[in-house]
Image (cartoon, rainbow, N blue to C red):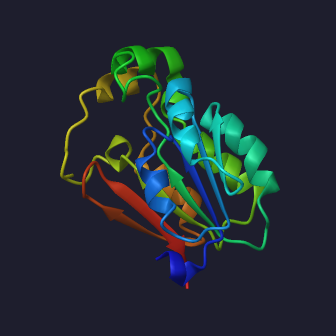
């Protein structure tokens, strides 16, 4: 996948415990960029930082606003978008507290895509979107169910999959994988 599309840069939102970043480091990207809002997680991941690996402490949207315009336009990027629920995934607060406190920043995917699309030609870039079950309720996932969907909808934070795919479908082939909590793979059209 990486070799086929000749990605030069890896950008992820949601560093977490750096599992995905560590996996990406097995491949020869020119640069790796990761962001998380949890300062403790960022500090833990800093051991991976070097002249090719940048790990930032920020909201994913603010990070992308700064980073995306600086990415070389002629180098394809692999975006792994997995930022959501600050504090909740690693048990610093409940999901209800995270969703209620952070609102749009608890579900920043649409904002992230809008920032990326506004700031670069994405036709050669690819996107892997994690936890697709939060947006697409049409499929059965390996780890199915989302007990906070009512709260998400009550706060006006539900974005249907079709709205996200509509942002990509003109330039990308989109494929849903139901493994784990679901993924959307958006790769450049041939």
Please give the name of the residue rendered at 35% of the width and 17% of the height, measured from the top-left corner: 96
Q: Nearer the viewer, residue 91 or 101?
A: 91
Image quarter in which the C terminus is found: bottom right
Q: Nearer the viewer, residue 160 or 172?
A: 172
Residue 87 position in % (x across, y down): 44, 22
Please give the name of the residue rendered at 53% of the width and 67% of the height, measured from the top-left corner: 169
Residue 184 position in % (x across, y down): 41, 59
Q: Nearer the viewer, residue 148 or 61?
A: 61
Q: Is residue 130 above or below residue 146?
A: below
Q: Is residue 142 above or below residue 154?
A: below
Residue 149 position in % (x across, y down): 31, 29
Q: Is residue 1 left or right of residue 58?
A: left
Please give the name of the residue rendered at 58% of the width and 57% of the height, measured from the top-left corner: 167
Q: Is residue 155 left or right of residue 31?
A: left
Q: Is residue 146 above or below residue 76?
A: above
Residue 147 position in % (x across, y down): 24, 28
Q: Is residue 140 left or right of residue 56?
A: left
Tag count: 0
Q: Can you tell which quarter of the image residue 150 is in?
A: top left
């Amino acid at each position: 996948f990486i070799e086929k599309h000749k990605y030069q840069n890896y950008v992820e939102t949601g560093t977490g415990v750096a599992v995905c970043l560590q996996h990406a480091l097995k491949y020869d990207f020119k640069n790796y960029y990761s962001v998380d809002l949890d300062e403790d997680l960022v500090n833990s991941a800093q051991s991976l930082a070097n002249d090719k690996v940048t790990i930032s402490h920020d909201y994913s949207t603010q990070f992308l606003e700064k980073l995306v315009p600086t990415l070389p336009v002629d180098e394809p990027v692999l975006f792994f978008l997995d930022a959501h629920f600050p504090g909740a995934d690693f048990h610093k607060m409940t999901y209800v507290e995270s969703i209620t406190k952070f609102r749009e920043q608890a579900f920043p995917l649409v904002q992230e895509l809008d920032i990326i699309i506004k700031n670069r030609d994405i036709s050669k870039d690819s996107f892997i979107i994690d936890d697709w079950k939060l947006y697409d309720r049409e499929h059965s996932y390996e780890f199915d169910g989302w007990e906070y969907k009512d709260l998400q909808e009550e706060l006006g934070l539900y974005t249907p999959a079709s709205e996200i795919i509509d942002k990509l479908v003109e330039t990308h082939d989109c494929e849903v994988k139901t493994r784990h909590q679901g993924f959307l793979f958006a790769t450049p059209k041939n």
